[in-house]
Amino acid sequence: MKETSPIYPKAFIPYGTWGSSWFPAWHTSALAEVDIARFAAEAMAYIMGKRNVPISELEYLVSGSTIPWLYKFWNSPYLSHCLGHRLPGFHIEQACATGLQIIAKAAAHLQGGAQDVVGVLAFDKTSNSPAGVFPNQGTYRRTEVLSDIWDNFGYDPATGQQGFNQATGETAMIACAGRTSRKYKLDFKEVAELSCHRYQQYFEAKDTGILNKTMVPMQVLDVRGKKLGMVDDDYGVRRYASLDQFLTERQLDTCVAAGGQTHASDGMATLLVTTEEKARELSPEPDISIQFIASAEDRAQAGYMSESPVLAVGKLFAKTGFSVKDMVAIYDHNPFAVTDVVFAKSFDCDWHDMNNTGCPMIYGHPQGPTLVRATIEALEHAVTKGGGYVLVFGCAAGDVGIAGIFKVTDNRGGK
């Protein structure tokens, strides 16, 4: 295995102490009716219990979400109260980069030596997202009402790019993908083939039970403790019968069609960042070591969000000396199939070998926890491969790209 000097030499993730809810599409599950922050914190306690990790082991909490929630002012200290263990901590949001960003911030915090066990908790609920009322001296109305999800997805205030077009279904985000497709001269046939392959990967992993290693079914209760329903599937995921269905879909913009883009959903995901010693102590498989090696961010030209991961990964490789060929697993947050084709073309790699057990383009996009779930699945896949280096990356609003590298070492011998 290639050696390099890690940027986070003290940061480890105890194998098997993680978990994620399934990501039901918006308004398809009981998650649409609950306080998502409280649910996520209680779900984290539930997951840690199933992993035999006492909540009392946690010394700090780094949380992340992107959609306003009740009592957000109180952020991580309130979440830890709901978790059942009062902790210090802080909250981060960076659109769809949030999940990997909070892992990196937890690693940096641990690197400073203040704590030995840092909890990472990410969540978001696109269902019933709030509308905000803002005073605005710059408009004749003096007041702006903003629907948090749809208005932000449809309009980029930094560039003034086109908002939601009801006739075409296009948003500012879709326009970014189309613009990047034209820059890289993508072929819609290849994008459709990739979309079809991503669905096949997801359903194969689901049908064989691989996802059960990381996904945790959860009962949702109301404030009285009454059962509202189970969240035990990525509800809303479509099934396509053949490649022809992808090829015949109407393009909303260049190389962007319904089968090649993600959908809004709800969910949470959690993991721990600890010292090497604590990782061995807390993991059910102490002979599996997972070290967070490095992370990097970069920003693309305005309006080219789907290109930003290429810049972030390129920067990360330049910092560490790694290349795509050194990776045993590559997973990403891909709101569009275009993102993966552009990445594969830029680094001369085979997109068939990415996202082996699923990706957000298929199972949904609750923003905050998306890259945490992708990271967990990537690390689990690397373990099944016997270890190696793992690359996780994604894009975010503002044309930002983020990337991270993890090292998985399996010392279990004959297993």
Image (tube, grey):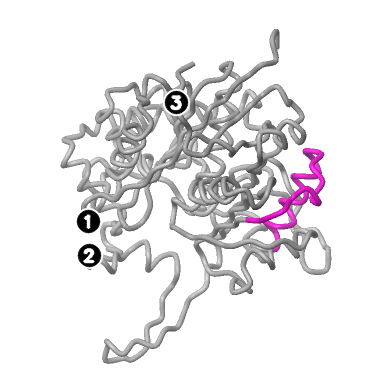
Location of mark 1 (residue): 302
Q: Position of residue 260 (x, y in %)?
A: 36, 40
In space, the residues marked 2 and 1 are separated at their CA atoms by 7 Å
At mark 3, the secondary structure is loop
At mark 2, the secondary structure is loop
What range of the chain is rendered magenta?
Answer: 38-61
Q: Position of residue 347 (x, y in %)?
A: 28, 27
Q: Can residue 149 be seen in the rendering of this structure?
A: yes
Q: Establish if 383 lies above or below 175.
A: above
Say which mark, if any, is on residue 4.
3
Amino acid of disc 3: Thr
Say whether marks 2 and 1 touch (CB < 8 Å). yes
First along the sequence among labels 1 and 3: 3
Q: Position of residue 33 (x, y in %)?
A: 66, 65
> In this rendering, would 168 be left or right of 390?
left
> In this rendering, would 312 be left or right of 212?
left
Location of mark 2 (residue): 159
At mark 1, the secondary structure is loop
In space, the residues marked 2 and 3 are separated at their CA atoms by 39 Å
